[in-house]
Each structure stands twice: as C-alpha cells, then as structure tokens.
Amino acid sequence: MAAMTATGARTQYETIIGIEVHAQLRTASKMFCACPTAPPPDAADEPNTRVCPICMGMPGTLPTINRRAVELVMLTGLALDCRVETAAVRFERKNYFYPDLPKGYQISQYALPLTSNGSLEVPVPTEGGSVRIGITRAHLEEDTARLSHAGRGFSVVDFNRAGIPLMEIVTEPDLRSPAQARAYGETLRDILRYIGASNADMEAGSMRIEGNVSLRPMGDDRFGTKVEVKNLNSFRSLERAMEYEVARHAEALERGEPLRQETRGWDEGAGRTIVQRSKEEANDYRYFPEPDLPPLRPSQAWVADLRAQLPELPAARRERYETELGLSAYDAGVLTADVALAAYYDAVVEAGAAPKTAANWVTGEFSRLLNQRAADGLRADGVALAPGGLAELIAAVESGSVSGTNAKAVLGRTFASGESPLAVIEAEGLGQVSDAGLIGREVEAVLAEFTSQVAEYRSGKTQLYGFLVGQVMKRTAGRADARLVNDELRRRLDEGA
Ligand SMILES: [Zn+2]
C-alpha cells in the first residue's frame, strides 16, 4: 500500500491482518445440555422451542460437557497442526451483560485453550503462491442467542442458538493482504467441512469471520492501531472490507490523523465500514474458572485416536489428483471443494474408471444432476447410483457399446433410481449399433428418402450434412455408432458427387 505524502514522496505501508473465526460445531445437541441444535427434519424452526433450564441459565442447574464438541475442536486443532492440550483445560466464565446471554456470562476458554500453536498453508492464487499462517489457538465456547431488532424501539430474542457449541479459531497477525485474508477463510472453510467439524456456511451464519487490520510503515516492527471489522457475510465481503480499511488507514496515516482502536461493521450495500464501538479490553470480561465444570484432561490415547480419524485434507487431495491422477488444477479444485464429491470420484476411480474420464463425468453430467437437486440438500453421498455403477457406464462408453448421448440419458435415470446402468441399456435397447451392414442400409434409406437435400448438398450446400446425419440417427433411435455413420455417409455422398 502506498500513499502520497505532502512532499510527494511515497510512504510504503505494510498491511497486517489477523483473523478470528467462529464456527458452529456439527453436533446433535448443545454444548452443556441435551437440547437439539436443529429442528427435527421437516419441522419448522420455531423460535424458542429448543431451550431448557440449563441453556436458559436457570439457578440451580448444572452444565455437562458435550464430548463430541470437544472432539471436533481437537480434530480441528490436529488438522491445523496445533498442539492439543492434555494438561487440565479449564472452562472459564466470560462475563458481560447483554440480552443475548441468558446466564449473564458465556462459558469459554481463556488462559489455556484446548489447542494452540498451529499453522496452515494457504494457497493464494491471485498472488501466485502460498503463505503459511500461524494459528494462535482454537478453543471451545458456547453460542449466544439471536437478537432481531424489530424496529420501533424493540427487539426480539430467539434462544434456540443459545448454548450451541462454538469454536473460535484465531490466527497470528500473519496475513499481509486482503486477498490472503479471503484465501485463508476459504481454505479454513474447506478443512472444517472435510473433517465434519462445521457446515462452515458464512451466509447461514454457521461460520463468522472478523478481520483485525492495522498498517505500519514498511520495515517498522511495531504494530499500528488495530481495527476489528465484523458483519462479514461472505468471503467477498471480507476481502472488500479489508481493502476498504487498508485504504482508510493509509489515508489517515498520511494526513497524520490518529486512528482509534475500535470495532467497525461492514455495510455491504454502501461498501464501507462504520464505527460500532470502541474496543473493550480483555479484562473487562472478568474471566474466572467455571466452578460448575471439572477441568478437561484429554488423554494421549484419545488424541492419538482422533489423529488416526483425520481424513485426507483438501490440499493433500488436490496434490494427489494433479500429480498421481494427472488431473488439471481446475478439475482437482472442483472435485476437492466438496468432500462428498471427492469421495464419490475416488470410488469411481477405484471401481476401475480412468481418472481423467471419470473426472469429466463427475464434474460434468453428474454434477449437473446434483446441482438440479441442490435445493433438496442432496450431496454426492446421497445419490442412489453407486460409484461402481458410474464406472460401469463409463466403461460402456469407452468400449463403444453405448453412445455418449444415450449414456447421459442412462445416467439421468439411474442417478435417482440406483438401477444398474448396464441393465437399463439392455432393457431399453439403448446399446450402440456398430453393425456396419445395418448402418449402411440406414444411410442408403436416408439418401433415397431425401433426394433433394442430397442434391443440394452435392451442389455445395454442405451445411445439410448435419441434417442427413440426424436422419440416420433418428432411424436408429440414436443408437448408431456416430463414427461409422460419418464414414458411411461421407463415402456415399462423395461417391455420387
Ligand atoms: Zn438446553
């Protein structure tokens, strides 16, 4: 970032960004009680229906720790190369008074987080390389209720979200550009989804990002005044908000205007940040150990067991697809962005399909069918057609026993029914006709039927060729081997010319 000084010289600034992510963990029940985290399938999500005396903070109730939530934070820590704490980890009370907090405090971790000191390698395509971002900590806490400001001076509160397990992941101030901030967010989202820790959906609010920005003159090792930006509903907003703040800081520094340490909100429509409040210091929260919960002591065996459960992460998978399977960076990126799609693809290849052909089918027709049903929440692992069935269909196309067009039709049908593609091809008579004698007779019949078109073609109206091919395909119900039809048609048209 450069800005003009009064003398016309340019001061170079270094951008310093740190990111805080809050991700709702994928558990069935809340952090400290048995309330479900989501409404039953097909039921409406009515406000204040998933609450109990514990998550409502009634006197005399006692919290219990959700084991799965602890595991998901440890898994995340392991995926981010963090150290997992096996000494006694205490939960602590973070005290503040606000209508979204039924107890008047949030149970969180402060002095000793469950996991810390990790790092994440983040590819930044727009900068032509990758950066290693230090992960300070990933800890466990509980979500607050949801406040809606209803206008006319009143607000309503929904406690369904209060007490849902929440993970906070904090980076070191290692990011040097808005593009890196965005790339970090996207890379982290992919990992959280891969390990099943969170749906990590920014628009749905299951992943929330705050960016801390400051600028300092290039070469300076002290940090400048830091501003925290909230209300970021997409990775694009994150990048835009960081760009806005970098420009705002540079301008203020050039003019010699003081910057204030504060929290600002991003206004997507206006494309700018707005002051929300001046930053409270950590000790405003009066943290102290939660007396109602025992310290956590994750055993070495538990950590080792979780480490063994870690799936192949997106970066490693992309690398394998490109180097071992010879896929393009684009195909590898599309496949690995969705863990269920990548698993399906792997199974198709395992069933014997050639990697590149399988990638074409899975990112092409298969994904098109999947996207049509995306609104129903269908993922690749919910598709009725087994990966072996798709491999079987691909083999049939490769061997020429079904045409590409008919194979797509067969996929369209078996995708939802789960029938064997070969059985459908057999039953519906969709197999490709490669009988040269039969194709010759059909070509002959078409030439005899469309004499005027044939004459026009021969007098130079070559675009009629496609029409004649279409007639042959029509007579064979699309089953004729297109290569044989072409050979035969060209030969006979040239003969008579
Ligand atoms: Zn509850």
Image (cartoon, helix red, strand yellow):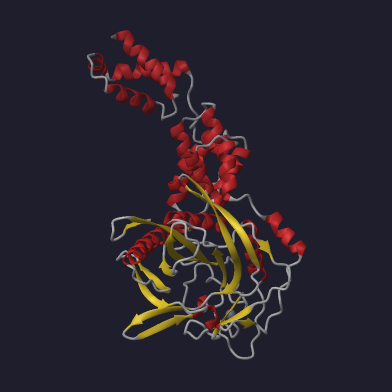
Q: Identify the residue at the far front of this view.
A: 7
Vertical arrangement, residue 302 with respect to residue 112, above or below: above
Q: Nearer the viewer, residue 257 or 272?
A: 257
Which quarter shows the C terminus?
top left
Q: Nearer the viewer, residue 495 or 248?
A: 248
Q: Quadrant of residue 267?
A: bottom left
Q: Quadrant of ligand 1?
A: bottom right
Vertical arrangement, residue 329 with respect to residue 453, above or below: below
| Position of residue 331 in the picture relative to residue 392 (left or right) | left
Picture coordinates of residue 96, whole percent (x, y): 52, 84
Picture coordinates of residue 422, whole percent (x, y): 56, 35
Residue 204 visible in the current orientation: no
Vertical arrangement, residue 407 with respect to residue 24, above or below: above
Picture coordinates of residue 291, whole percent (x, y): 67, 84
| Position of residue 405 in the picture relative to residue 494 (left or right) | right
Q: Nearer the viewer, residue 291 or 6?
A: 6
Residue 313 visible in the current orientation: yes
Q: Quadrant of residue 453?
A: top left
Residue at (44%, 47%) from the top-left corner?
127
Q: Nearer the viewer, residue 450 or 121?
A: 121
Picture coordinates of residue 89, whole percent (x, y): 69, 73
Q: Quadrant of residue 182?
A: bottom left
Which quarter shows the N terminus?
bottom left
